[in-house]
Image (spheres, helix red, strand yellow):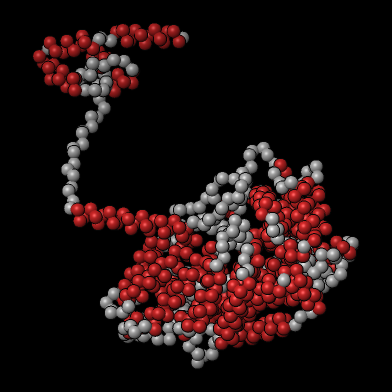
Amino acid sequence: MMDSLIRSKRRVADSAPEDSELDNELAGDSENQTAYDETLDRKQACNRCRRRKIRCNRAITCSNCARSRSDCSYPAIGHHREKRQRIHMSAKHEQKIDRIFEVLDELRVKVDNLSQEAHPRLSGGHNEEATSSNVEPENQPSLLSHAVFASQFLRALFGESNGPRELVRKMELSLGALHGVIDSQRQQKTTLHNVYPYARTMPQGTSLGGLRMPPVEISLECLQKAKECQRVQFFWLSEFVSLSQFTEYLVKVYSPGPSSNTERIIVLGGIFWLFCECALDTADAQTRERFWNQAALSREALETDLYHLPFHTPINFDSVLAMSIAASYCFRTGKISAAWNFTTNAAHLCQALGFHRPHVLSADSPDLKQRKAKLLWTIFTLERNLSLQLGRPSTFHVDDIALPQLSVAPNTTADFPFNITLTKHIHVAALQGRAYNEIYSLGALSQPIEIRTRRAEKLASELRNILEHEDEIETRYSEARRHALGSTLHELFQCAARINELSLLTLLYRGIPPDKSSDIAFCNECVDTARAALEEHQRSISIITSSHVKGHPLEMYINWSFLLFPFFPFIVLFCHIAQTFDQSDLHLLKSVVETLESIPESAFYQTHSKQIRLFRALYDVAQTYIELKTSEVEPQIASWDFNQMLTTIGVPFLPQASDSLLHSTHIGTADAMPIPTIDGAASHYVNQGFDDVPGSSGTFTAEIDETALELGNWFQGNHEMLRLLDDSYLRQ
């Protein structure tokens, strides 16, 4: 069959005349001279000959088509593009164009610098880059559009005045920096690779059990050092598991045979912090470097296990402990949303196993009963902290927990006192859940203002009583901490605890409205408590500078002081300054910024770079605003509305349902310059207030008063700012 096809094709080809014969035939015929001339110009065969793949003489009607009496057509011949004349520009125009390109390049570099977050890779980590979306999400304003709008807004206010143009330019830069921090985080699309940047890529067919782990000899060396050093015990995970219990998990994982995901997470999370603490407590440089290298190896294996953790985990004690250690790891490294996910998972497992019911624990041994009770209260404390911080309802109901509130008796373990959950912490955690339910939840905001005010006053009174009393266990804990850390670090962590307590008290007082005769947005108790929190922070700064505190203790102080309640006192004073122009309060804000900026970057603690940029930008805006308002300017500058200025650039924590929260004490009316129209880019955030809850605009907002809307906006805005700093918040 194939031979016959080849022979038939050859016959067709042989029957076709040669090109030279056809050319001579056409050339000899005067009537076909025109066709011959056009044939010479053609470079392609006709469509039919091209399909049959035979030779074509390229005539108007080629010989093959003429013999078969078929239509002969050719591909369209394209016209040559005419050369365009170059437009000659003057040197002046070329310089302007070059300058435009330079400005665009500078803007691109600034945007890249704002949107990039450094994740230094430790040795042995995978090289897969964390993916982030550079495509601007729909309906979200870009940095450029907001920067242009803010610039136009300021020029409209000051363009025709004789005011201090240097201050106007400074305010433009401050607003641009503030919005740059906010917008760069909103544009970043977080994936699991961002949450766990050190996780290794697992080749197909390999198991997590084959991950490389630190040598068992070095792990046991660190474990022995921890048993001998109370300082290491304090900074370790003693609140979740004792060193003796952890040793059992370590031996099991390192022994031949299979190990579960939860067992590996317990061991890897434990030895990671052990290596970190032992490295910081070691004077020998070579030994310290060896511990840091093993900590890096442990971190890579831990994040790989967390990255590949299945959705469904076994319902047993090991799963509860593993979720708790994972939550602690994420919290210490600034991944607040991931910490919340692990904590709620641990809370659900606790309740599924009946840790909160004495009759369920009655069949356990006394030691196991104590371990379960201690773990339950530790998870309860962490979960309530994160619940209020993130503005979410708690998964625990206090009425369902029937256990005593002191989980471990003083002398039942050799690791006392660092492995207990203090009664004060449990009481404060319970009060945090009530603060959300009774003041800041949607149901509480729909209550009359009188009821909400009485609740806030009662909670504040209860918190003060809790903080003023100290039981015997807490006294022994405090003395043991002083002995383990020394007086300097002991006082520093006392300041951190006091800052957290005052921050919570500030949040409670925020639920109390100011007097009707007052022009200030917050009640006096709220402002005084926020000021006291930052003054306590100022005292801690003097301890840090006078004693040259550095390294891990300083980083832990920042973690405890700013990650639990990072914004409430700072934002209260920030808003208060906009109304009172108080220089002393501005100085307190400055002390917070300088403390954050004094911390050197660490390969293991990368949680503060975003906080530094945000706090610095807020302080610069407040400082410049005070300079503008207190300078000798024209009336339209004196009437500038701080609330309007910030909401136009997308700052989320200012209430947007009403004009009364941050109105200036010198706002003008008839003499004020009209505010420029806010385009779609800028108005996206102006109209995105608490009153725009999906599905509730027609019902929910009609049931609450203006004060509740302002309170809800302020509370929601604080959590929005926190999410901007959270690397583990999975943005769509």
Q: Is residue 311 visible in the rendered structure shown here? A: no
Q: Residue drawn at (28%, 79%), measured in percent from left and top?
A: 161
Q: Residue furthest left?
A: 30
Q: Is residue 371 above or below residue 480?
A: above
Q: Position of residue 419 (x, y in %)?
A: 78, 66
Q: Residue drawn at (48%, 53%), measured in percent from left and top?
A: 133
Question: Number of labelled discs?
Answer: 0
Q: Is 231 placed left or right of 604 in the picture?
A: right
Q: Is 430 placed left or right of 599 in the picture?
A: right
Front-most of residues 359 and 26: 359
Front-most of residues 145 and 252: 252
Location of residue 358 by image quarter? bottom right
Q: Residue drawn at (32%, 78%), measured in percent from left and top?
A: 164
Q: Is 525 placed left or right of 3 in the picture?
A: right
Q: Position of residue 49 (x, y in %)?
A: 30, 18
Q: Residue drawn at (54%, 50%), measured in percent from left and top?
A: 130
Q: Residue furthest bottom?
A: 517
Q: Position of residue 640 (x, y in %)?
A: 38, 80
Location of residue 554 by image quarter? bottom right
Q: Position of residue 716 (x, y in %)?
A: 55, 71
